[in-house]
Image (spheres, rainbow, N blue to C red):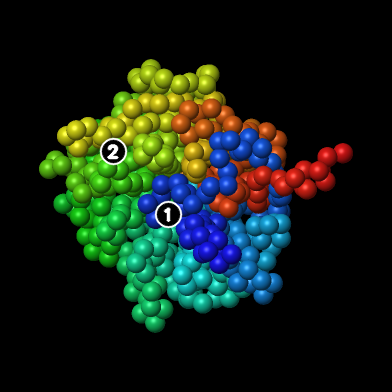
């Protein structure tokens, strides 16, 4: 009996129901290697286990951040797996993963008052997905006033801060944690902020050293990639930047991929697409397509793309060669043939997976149909006028060069969001949102800030014409649809993420609902049968 127990403990040493940060890990791969309960063989039996209506009022396009999960949290009612979310009402929630009941919530105090009314680019709400420090049982989050809190996982008690971190009402993106340093990025000049990378040393709460690195001397260059920062194997911080001026000698790094020292003291390397001027002119900035880092055949590689719908592979140790403009690999234009600044192209973060055969895969969410310049994909699943997931195999040559081989296109999806993958299954949400931003399409230059805002759709206009989100599960090797949640979700969602762990899939919608999908037990199925 003892030997059997020892064998079980050995086999389950890596078992975990944790999803501690956006896209699962600091590299933002979207891949959970610990999940083994859901598989291509059984994921078709997924069903909605529960939904929780959280007391959180949506603001503009914002509602709940992407869900995070921590298992074996020692609460007053015993050990629990908890789901954590920050809400647009400046309230933080911890929810029991078994039944959807709120275990604790905390509304963060703020004495700051925004100077402008909220709108979809600047909602004046928390925007950054939090991050969990499992070792110390703390979750870090940012309040509307820009202060960072470290909350106890089990109780919500404040154990760190609050400390000033970013400007009040700045729009921050997902928090990341590496070697005792907490990171975020900002964009869109919300709250008067200038686009930058921010860090704070949280390992020693008595010495909270904080730093900022601005990618421009003025406004612009926003780093609005969903995952915020990507952390490399040696702690290097990688980001992609948006439209603006480009002059490295003056510290202007718009429309580029940057490698920044962990202490944010300097830019160590950068890659700027050769057509960066056209990208900036047409508002095709890079952050829309996200960024991740993965290691394959011993080499660390970055993968990302933007609205232009060109996918780049970059050597993390040498982003762009001596000219800073030579990528390891760049694809043809995959979508957005008309170079539209909204509604089409790469939107959301990619995902990376290594199968049991050690083959590497990359997956990219695309809005709209494919371009005529897109390569041939051997496996297709019908027309995709609204959007799809594109799958590529990572190919390594004998010379150590890397490229992408088209593999499959998913069935049509109504504006797919960032995919995640676990145990041979790829999961993604068809968001059902309204991607239209402007009354008059194609305007990239305005006489004044007032003219620009006048052209933006209102929150009510953006909310019109939406459809409930749909969770889709696909075979990660073929793109075959294995599961479709149909009408289980009740509302659309904007810029979100999934958590897949412990045999369950967690998702949110714009009406502040948290959904849990999983496999029903035989007893539960029998009870549900009339």
Relative to the observer, which residue lies in front, 50 or 463?
50
Sequence-wise, which precedes: disc 1 or disc 2? 1
How many residues crowd around disc 2 within 10 Å: few (fewer than 14), some, or many (20 or more)? many
Labelled disc at residue 25: 1
Relative to the observer, which residue lies in front, 497 or 449?
497
Instruction: Please state, as top left, top right, bottom left or bottom right, where the N terminus lies in the image.
Output: bottom right
Does the image show residue 426? yes
User: Which residue shows up at 44% across the image and 59% down it?
Assistant: 175
Instruction: Please state, as top left, top right, bottom left or bottom right, where the C terminus lies in the image.
Output: top right
The relative height of residue 254 versus residue 346 in the rendered view (above or below) is below
Labelled disc at residue 463: none
SS assignment at label 2:
strand
Relative to the observer, which residue lies in front, 273 or 138?
138
Q: Residue furthest right?
A: 530
User: Which residue shows up at 49% across the image and 57% down it?
Assistant: 11
User: Which residue shows up at 41% across the image and 78% down it?
Assistant: 205
Nearer to us: label 1 or label 2 = 1
Determine which residue is flagged by label 2. 313
Q: Position of residue 92 (x, y in %)?
A: 60, 64
The relative height of residue 237 versus residue 134 in the rendered view (above or below) is above
Q: Quadrant of residue 208?
A: bottom left
Q: Quadrant of residue 98?
A: bottom right
Q: Residue furthest bottom?
A: 206
Q: Position of residue 520 (x, y in %)?
A: 71, 45
Mark pair 1, 2: CA separation: 19 Å
User: Which residue shows up at 61% across the image and 38% down it?
Assistant: 42
Q: Position of residue 280 (x, y in %)?
A: 31, 37
The relative height of residue 373 versus residue 93 in the rendered view (above or below) is above
User: Is the residue under label 2 in contact with that under label 1 (CB below 8 Å)?
Assistant: no
Relative to the observer, which residue lies in front, 373 or 4?
4
């Amino acid at each position: 009996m003892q030997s059997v127990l020892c064998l079980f403990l050995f086999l389950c040493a890596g078992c975990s129901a944790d999803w501690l940060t956006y896209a699962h890990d600091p590299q933002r791969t979207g891949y959970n290697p610990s999940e083994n309960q859901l598989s291509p063989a059984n994921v078709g039996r997924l069903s909605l286990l529960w939904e929780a209506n959280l007391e959180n009022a949506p603001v503009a396009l914002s509602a709940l951040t992407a869900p995070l999960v921590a298992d074996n949290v020692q609460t007053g009612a015993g050990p629990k797996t908890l789901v954590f979310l920050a809400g647009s009402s400046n309230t933080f929630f911890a929810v029991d993963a078994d039944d959807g009941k709120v275990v604790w919530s905390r509304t963060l105090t703020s004495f700051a008052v925004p100077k402008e009314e909220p709108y979809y680019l600047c909602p004046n709400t928390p925007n950054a997905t939090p991050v969990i420090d499992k070792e110390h049982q703390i979750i870090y989050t940012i309040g509307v006033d820009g202060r960072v809190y470290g909350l106890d996982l089990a109780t919500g008690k404040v154990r760190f801060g609050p400390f000033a971190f970013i400007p009040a009402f700045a729009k921050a993106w997902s928090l990341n944690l590496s070697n005792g340093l907490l990171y975020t990025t900002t964009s869109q000049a919300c709250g008067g902020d200038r686009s930058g990378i921010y860090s704070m040393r949280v390992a020693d709460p008595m010495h909270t050293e904080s730093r900022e690195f601005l990618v421009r001397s003025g406004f612009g260059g926003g780093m609005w990639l969903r995952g915020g920062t990507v952390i490399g194997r040696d702690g290097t911080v990688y980001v992609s930047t948006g439209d603006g001026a480009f002059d490295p000698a003056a510290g202007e790094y718009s429309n580029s991929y940057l490698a920044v020292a962990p202490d944010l003291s300097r830019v160590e390397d950068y890659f700027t697409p050769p057509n960066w001027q056209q990208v900036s002119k047409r508002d095709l900035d890079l952050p829309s397509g996200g960024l991740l880092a993965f290691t394959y055949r011993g080499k660390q590689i970055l993968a990302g793309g933007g609205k232009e719908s060109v996918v780049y592979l970059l050597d993390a140790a040498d982003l762009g060669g001596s000219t800073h403009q030579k990528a390891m690999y760049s694809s043809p234009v995959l979508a957005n043939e008309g170079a539209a600044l909204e509604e089409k192209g790469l939107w959301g973060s990619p995902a990376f997976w290594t199968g049991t055969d050690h083959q590497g895969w990359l997956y990219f969410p695309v809005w709209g149909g494919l371009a005529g310049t897109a390569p041939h994909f051997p496996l297709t699943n019908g027309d995709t006028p609204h959007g799809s997931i594109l799958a590529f195999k990572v190919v390594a040559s004998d010379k150590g060069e890397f490229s992408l081989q088209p593999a499959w296109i998913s069935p049509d999806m109504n504006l797919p969001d960032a995919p995640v993958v676990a145990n041979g299954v790829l999961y993604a949400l068809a968001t059902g949102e309204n991607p239209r931003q402007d009354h008059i399409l194609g305007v990239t230059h305005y006489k004044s800030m007032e003219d620009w805002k006048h052209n933006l759709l209102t929150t009510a206009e953006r909310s019109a014409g939406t459809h409930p989100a749909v969770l889709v599960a696909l075979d990660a090797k073929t793109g075959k649809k294995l599961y479709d949640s149909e009408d289980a979700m009740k509302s659309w969602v904007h810029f979100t993420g999934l958590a897949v762990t412990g045999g369950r899939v967690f998702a949110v919608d714009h009406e502040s609902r948290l959904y849990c999908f999983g496999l029903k037990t035989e007893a539960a199925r029998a009870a549900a049968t009339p």
